[in-house]
Amino acid sequence: MTELRRPELVDPKLHDRSAFDSGAPDLDDWLRRYSTQNRRRNTAATWVITTADSVVVAYVSLAMTSIDRGDAPSSVAKHAPDPVPALLIGRLAVDRSYAGLGIGTALVTHVLATAVDLNARAACRAVVVSAIDQAARSWWERLGFHPFDPADPGNPDLYLLTGEIEATLRSFG
């Protein structure tokens, strides 16, 4: 297996994104066309995992967000300001050649560590994500994320409270 680097912020001069193929053209195109543009505009930070020769094999984009307390699950809204500060996982994708190797989970581990650091410095009540499909929703739930509306299996929105991160990371092994 090819040696992989730790997550680092995407750098268009260093990281080769041209051959990235997650099987989801919209996610692939976003990485190539918009990831660095979003960083320059301070709207999203994209972290990549690469091979030793800087070929991107996975990425995750992060941005700050807020949740209207009236729309938030009770565990998120309880004792929280309005709006509730959160960290948004905008996109996460793994190249098909590297699927099933735990790289997605490694990126989530990085995201959760980022959320803990962010919470210590500013405030971050939860990490939120909108699952791209039902398979992704199930994957996020296996990682410990909770549906915003458990009664609505069609709702793609999930969350993990910052206070739950330590236990979640322990469950990863």
Image: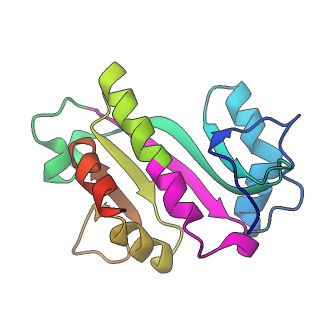
Q: Quadrant of residue 145?
A: bottom left
Q: Is residue 84 shown above or below 92?
A: above
Question: What residue lies at 32% left-to-right and 29% top-to-bottom?
Answer: 119
Look at the image and give the residue range highlighted in magenta.
83-109
Q: Is residue 173 shown above or below 163?
A: below
Q: Quadrant of residue 113?
A: top left
The x and y percentages for residue 60 are 60, 50
67 within the magenta span: no
Q: Quadrant of residue 62?
A: top right
Q: Can you see residue 9?
A: yes
Identify the colour scheme used: rainbow
Of 115 and 124, which appears nearest the observer? 115
Question: What residue lies at 23% left-to-right and 53% top-to-bottom?
Answer: 167
> Residue pushed farthest left?
79
> Does 52 sit left or right of 8 as displayed?
right
The x and y percentages for residue 69 are 22, 41
99 within the magenta span: yes
Q: Is residue 85 shown above or below 62?
A: above
Question: What residue lies at 21% left-to-right and 43% top-to-bottom?
Answer: 163
The x and y percentages for residue 138 are 40, 76
> Does 123 sit left or right of 107 as displayed?
left
The x and y percentages for residue 152 are 28, 75
> Residue pushed farthest top?
121
Question: What residue lies at 32% left-to-right and 33% top-to-bottom?
Answer: 124
Of 65 and 50, which appears nearest the observer? 50
> Does 77 sit left or right of 166 as displayed?
left
- Quadrant of the snapshot with the N terminus: bottom right
Q: Can you see residue 23?
A: no
- Quadrant of the snapshot with the C terminus: bottom left
